Image (tube, rainbow, N blue to C red):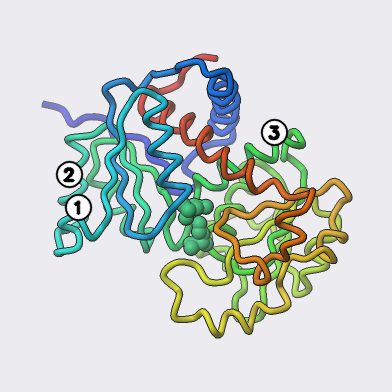
Amino acid sequence: MSAPPAPKHFLQFRDFTREEFDHLFERTRWIKDRFKRYELYQPLRDRTLAMVFEKASTRTRVSFEAGMNQLGGIAINLNRHDTQLSRGEPIEDVARVISRMVDVVMIRTFEQAIIERFAAHSRVPVINGLTNEYHPCQILADVFTYVEHRGSIQGRTVAWVGDANNVCATWLQAAAILDFRMHVATPPGYEVDPRAAGLADTSRLSVFADPMEACRGADLVTTDVWTSMGFEAENEARCKAFADYQVDAGMMAMAKPDALFMHCLPAHRGEEVAAEVIDGPQSVVWDEAENRLHAQKALLELLVCGRVAP
Ligand code: CP
Ligand code: NVA
């Protein structure tokens, strides 16, 4: 018997082309509109999503589980400590077994290498629900949110202030694929590393020492926690190093007057963002969180059903 074709995965943003993202944004719009009209859309009846969480989650857990249910399927939640992973079962074996039983898998874990190993042994599509290196589902929803509010992101400028972490690296990949500029400001010692971000083309990246300069003329200002999950031991040193990198009203005033503010959440008011910004009129963080649901439903549809014509 010949081997089944290799499934399509979403392990990092650059796994998809611009044309595929355009399709996903179109489907997200359609799926969201239907959902708002309370119209059933259940292309994933009898389909199962397995969710493997090795780190905490609120948005990713709820959006994938609710989304899968709304599409007519079911979601199984597996926390590391409830599974044999916690007793040393190899990730390759877990992938072989789970992927014979379900139609699609979402994983939130530590190193990107773990999800790559899982995907290499999976018969079904694997989605990255956050790793130390990337958070592609987040930026899928974020770019959709930008487009919803302001139209195409092509040619726009996104300012990233703070830690050059997994969310930042994913924005950098998105900029290369969707053709917009990234201004990144990080404290000394926490600089962005384009190679670690999986960025071959750095032509859209500008690095700034001064976060005010990074925000100058930006269409979107965004940030994230100073200490990501898995790096808690560094928290004290990070709070000191990042003290001048809080997105506040002064930084927003450097951006375009109609600039948006985004944060993937959870947020720490008074650390990476001032309350007046995240709770202010330019903030679209609640739309951004909601759009995780709609964008991931489009992603699940694409990975499980293939392309659905509009
Ligand atoms: N933004 C995000 O992924 O949130 P959770 O950690 O709550 O899933
Ligand atoms: N950078 C953060 C994002 C949380 C959604 C983390 O990895 O903890």
Q: Secondary structure at mark 1?
A: helix
> Tag 2: residue type?
Arg
Q: What mark, if any, has residue 96 been given in the picture? A: 2
Outermost residue on the left side: it is: 1
For label 1, the residue is 92
Please state the horizontal and vertical placement of residue 254, each as a whole percent of the image.
87, 61
| Label 2 Cα neighbours within 10 Å, binned few <14 / some 14-19 / many ≥20 | some
In this view, the residue in front, 40 or 49, is 40
Q: Are marks 1 and 2 in contact (CB under 8 Å)?
A: yes
Which secondary structure, mark 2? Answer: helix
Q: Nearer the viewer, mark 1 or mark 3?
A: 3
User: Residue 234 appears at what percent x and percent y?
Assistant: 49, 81
Give the amino acid at mark 1.
Glu
Query: Hey, which quadrant is residue 112 in on the image?
Result: bottom left
Q: Where is residue 131, by image quadrant?
A: bottom left
Question: What is the C-alpha distance between the residues marked 3 and 2?
Answer: 39 Å
Of the numbered discs in the image, which one, if any, rests on residue 148? 3
Which residue is rendered at x = 65% and y = 39% of the image?
A: 145
* Upstream in sequence: badge 3 or badge 2: 2
Helix or strand or loop: what does disc 3 sit on?
helix
Tell me the quarter of the image containing the N terminus. Answer: top left
Residue depicted at 65% across the width and 66% down the height: 269
Q: Label 1 vs label 3: CA separation?
A: 39 Å
User: Do the residues under discs 1 and 3 have CB atoms within 8 angstroms?
Assistant: no
Q: What is the C-alpha distance between the residues marked 1 and 2?
A: 6 Å
Which amino acid lies under the numbered mark 3 shown in the image of this protein?
Glu
